[in-house]
Structure formats: C-alpha cells, structure tokens
C-alpha cells in the first residue's frame, strides 16, 4: 500500500520547515550546540579514568569534565526551549503566522505541524551532537570509557527533554505572542522552580516538587543519578512527567490559538 501525505499537511509542514531553515540564528544555535557537545565529550573522553569517581559507570562520574558535559547537555535542552519560544513568539511580530493561516486555515493542523517541526529540528540537532560527540569521546578515550546503560540513558533523556522543551517553548510563544516574554517566561521558570523545591521541602512537601517540569527534566537527563532524591522523580517517571507537561503546554497553545484572532 502506497502511503501519501495529504496535500494540506505537506503544505503546512513545508511552510514550517522553511521558516526554521531561513532564519540564520537557528543555524548558528544548532551548529553551536553540536560543536559545544562534541568538544565537551572529547574533553570527557580524554580525561576519563576508570575506577575511583567513575567506578559505578558513566552517569556517576564527577570532576570538571563531567561537570562541563553536564552543563552542555543542560544548555542544549535550554536552547531547544529558547528556539521554540523565540520562533513562535516572533511570528506575531513579523506577521508570518497570519500569512500561514491563509494557506492553512485549519488551526489545529497549523499548530500540530508547528510543534512537530520544532520538535523534529531539536531532536535532529541533539542526535547529531550525541552521535558525533559519542564517536569523538570514544576516539579520545578509547575502550576505557564505559558506554554503558547509564551513558545511553543520559543520551535518551537529553533527546527526549529537548523535544519536550521545544514543544513547551513553542506553546508558550503562541500563548504570550512575544519572543521576549516567551523567552523570559521559559528561562525565568527554570530559575524560579528550584526556589519552589526549597520551599516545598521546608514545609514537608518535597515530593510535590518532583512533578514540576524542571525537576522532571533533571530526572530525565540524569540517568538515574538522583533516584533516591525526594525532589527528583526516578528517570522513567520523570520522562513520563515531562511528556505530560509538553502535552499540557501543547493543549494550552491550541486553546489560545484557536480562540483568538491571529
């Protein structure tokens, strides 16, 4: 049976892809994420020493190279959120969303393709970084670098988190209709939420913090490192929570997009 994409879907997807690829800043951010990830993995591979701080495997490593790699992965997820927020919020200023709606009057389809393309580009960028970075790490560190379950768990978690935060950022951009406000909301929440953790733990509701989006992100990308923490959900649960948060954000974006004038 031959599979064909409906013309309306192909037209909407083509429009969204062109919007993403035509913006030079997107290419710069994507290239920067890949380059930073590869350099961090090279440093980790070159400095990796079996035993001691790494005796339990990749995800339990510490030291400056592990810290560097961790922050690069965190910033990769933040870049996906910023990419979605700025891209969606900017469309109201440039008027591209209004023009696109003339060719794709079905706003549910318009939103779906926008979220799918944002998630796909974020996933592609992260996978490129992880594949090239993993290969570079193995070349730099040789067989002493354990590409174990912890390693692949971290990579899967980062890829999932990037997709989810690209969706969340895009939805926030559509709700707030401003790239500045959307970016401030997404990154501001990342700063504010740890304060909620501290407060929740102080009043005896630390487990409540584990369901929040940033906490879920930490749990998803940590490879199970914080499995015993009351503030961070175990990795499988954290991944599920993150998917639920992205679904909720997408639903909010759909609600506002279909009920307000563009």
Image: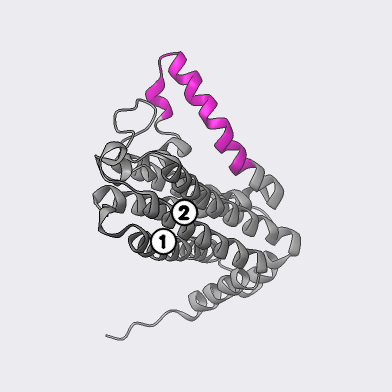
List the residue tagged with mark 2. Answer: 40
The N terminus, quarter of image: bottom left
Q: Residues within 10 Å of mark 1 (few under 14, many from 20)?
A: many
Q: Main SS of the magenta segment?
A: helix
**Left or right of 242: which side holds 257?**
right
Exactly how many numbered labels are in the figure? 2
Residue 94 rendering spot, x and y as whole percentages? 74, 64
Residue 163 rendering spot, x and y as whole percentages? 45, 56
Q: Quadrant of residue 170?
A: bottom right
Camera sees residue 262: no
The residue lying at 63 percent from left, 59 percent from top is 87
List the residue tagged with mark 1. Answer: 133
Q: Pointer 2 and pointer 1: residues touching (CB < 8 Å)?
A: yes
- Magenta residues (range): 185-209
Q: Quadrant of residue 67?
A: top left
Residue 245 rendering spot, x and y as whole percentages? 45, 44
- Dot 2: what SS? helix
């Amino acid at each position: 049976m031959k599979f064909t994409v409906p013309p309306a879907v192909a037209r909407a997807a083509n429009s969204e892809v062109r919007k993403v690829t035509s913006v030079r800043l997107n290419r710069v951010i994507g290239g920067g994420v890949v380059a930073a990830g590869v350099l961090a993995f090279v440093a980790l591979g070159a400095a990796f020493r079996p035993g001691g701080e790494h005796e339990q495997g990749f995800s339990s490593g510490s030291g400056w190279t592990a810290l560097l790699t961790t922050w690069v992965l965190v910033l990769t997820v933040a870049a996906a959120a910023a990419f979605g927020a700025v891209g969606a919020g900017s469309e109201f200023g440039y008027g591209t969303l209004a023009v696109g709606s003339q060719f794709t009057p079905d706003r549910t389809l318009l939103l779906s393709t926008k979220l799918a393309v944002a998630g796909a580009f974020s996933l592609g960028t992260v996978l490129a970084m992880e594949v090239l970075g993993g290969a570079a790490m193995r070349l730099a560190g040789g067989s002493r670098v354990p590409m174990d379950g912890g390693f692949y768990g971290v990579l899967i978690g980062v890829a999932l988190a990037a997709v989810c935060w690209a969706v969340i950022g895009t939805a926030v951009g559509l709700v707030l209709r401003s790239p500045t406000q959307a970016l401030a909301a997404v990154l501001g929440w990342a700063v504010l939420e740890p304060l909620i953790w501290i407060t929740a733990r102080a009043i005896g509701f630390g487990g409540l913090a584990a369901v929040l989006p940033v906490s879920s992100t930490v749990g998803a990308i940590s490879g199970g490192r914080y499995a015993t923490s009351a503030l961070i959900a175990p990795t499988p649960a954290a991944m599920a929570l993150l998917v639920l948060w992205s679904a909720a954000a997408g639903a909010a974006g759909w609600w506002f997009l279909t009920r307000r004038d563009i």
